[in-house]
Image (cartoon, grey):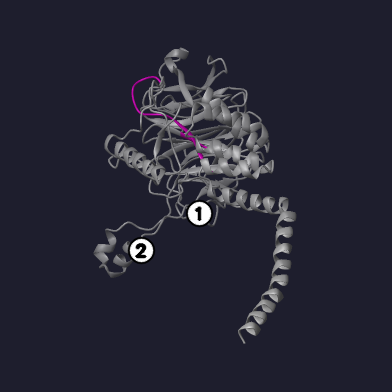
Amino acid sequence: MQLTAKKWLLSMAAASLLFTAGAVPAQAASKAPYESYNYGYYIEALPAPAAYLPSFSLSGDDLGIGSFVEPNDLYTTEAGVTYLLDSGNARIVIIGADWKLIKEITGFDNNGKADGFKKPSGIFVDQDGDLYVADTDNQRVVVLDPDGKLVKIVQEPKSDILAEGFKFVPLKVTVDKAKRIFVVAQGVYEGIMQFDEKGEFLGYAGTIKVQRDYGDYIWRRLSTKAQKAQMTLFIPTEFSNLDIDHKGFVYATNIDTGSEQPIKRLNPSGADVLKRYGYFAVAGDVYYRRAVGPSKFVDIKVLGDGMYSALDSTQGRVFTYDNEGDLLYVFGGKGNQLGTLKTPVAVEKSGESMIVLDRGKSNLVVYEPTIFGKHVNEAIKHHYAGDDGEAVASWQEVLKLNANYDIAYNGIGKAKLLEKDNKKAMEYFKLGMDRKNYSVAFKRYRTEVLKENFGTYMTVFIVLVVGILIARPLLKWRRRRVTNRAA
């Protein structure tokens, strides 16, 4: 009872801090220029060790090519080469793994004529090194080879399902291993546009449905035409960004801050298959200032091993989740210090490092994992690969750094469950508040105890039965004898 009261008080205190100050409980002696926290089972914001710390920032001036102007996107290959889309300067800046300039692409040859970009918004590099650029104001997707030579242009899609007068305004782009092109386009509510390798339009994937307010629906039914004209229509919202994993599943974010599912994982059929088994929604901050509003995701990055990071432009934070939908850690924030952001627009991964592109400061910031962050990533990697036994060592190191980390307790519990150590599994699931898996462990433990003590239980049962069978005739005989004596 005391524990429950304590949890309740912690939750109320955390909520009060967040709603009034717009911040989370500060981490003691934190080296980060931002508060580091996570949410527990009772959805209270708890201090946590920083998972990532800022290392350095990089601007166009640092590279010797002049300031970036409204940079919009970036992509990093497995080799650590970063492609930065400097939209205001209509160029692609290619940066090596050593963070030195490789080259710039400011234009290309288009059938003998000099051509270039106009306010491009998105960039992607496929496994062959081909560059896909969402050339927004030119209303096309430009595909270049690794040397910057034109491969093809995707523009003016034709289809019966497209509305008359449709304008193709691509914002973001990604490509799967089969060279299918997925495009987030401006003003398109039907979903993500798909094109084949030749650039032919295939259709849409992943329409976002809005949550309908039935109070508004009833009011609409009773309203006049003039009142209805002033009301918001129940139409699907738009996607804001996307990425793709090694299995060809598309991760996408939408621009609607009121959506209950701002992140989706779309299978080849376009159905959302994202797992949301965590204690709370996969939607960023649980508590936030009303004046600022909920998290608004503007980019998403698939990290591998079932993990993905979403960039929140509202508070300038990066939220990282695992394959089950558990929030692993949060880093970043708004401000002017190194590591804090002004207008974040893109997030990427380079080796173990994380990169955030800040359009407001016209630079990119590189973050390095802390010991805590490394142990969490290692544990998730082992668990995702099915090596829960290997994950235990990492989870134990995590708990040394953060005893309030529920996911670590549950991770060890799952490993103990696989080892058939059901009693230990119950203990860890109880600490991690995982009721579902605790029930599984409890049933198995109960069965285990019954099997181990079956002989004893049966002996006691048989003795009791035999005792009852013998006692009944003795009691009857004694009653008759007492009756006869009384007579």
- Residue at 35% x, 31% y: name it: 25
Horizontal side of residue 27 vs 99, given as left or right: left
114 or 76: which is nearer to us? 76
Q: What residue type is labelled 1?
A: Leu
Q: Residue 162 carries which label?
A: 1
Secondary structure of residue under mark 2? helix
Q: In this view, does 236 lie above or below 99?
A: below
308 or 374: which is nearer to us? 374
Q: In this view, does 28 lie above or below 226?
A: above
Q: Is residue 16 above or below residue 59?
A: below
Mark 2 vs mark 1, foreground winner is: 2
- CB of mark 2 within 8 Å of CB of mark 1? no
269 or 274: which is nearer to us? 274
The residue singled out by tag 2 in the image is 214
> Looking at the rendering, which quadrant does residue 79 occupy?
top right
Could you tell me residue 433's position as x and y percent? Answer: 50, 44
Q: What residue type is labelled 2?
A: Tyr
| First to last magenta residue range | 319-338
- At label 1, counting other C-alpha atoms closer than 10 Å, the crowd grade (few under 14, some 14-19, many 20 or more) is few
- Residue at 67% x, 82% y: name it: 480
Q: Earlier in the sequence, mark 2 or mark 1?
A: 1
Magenta stretch encompasses residue 37:
no
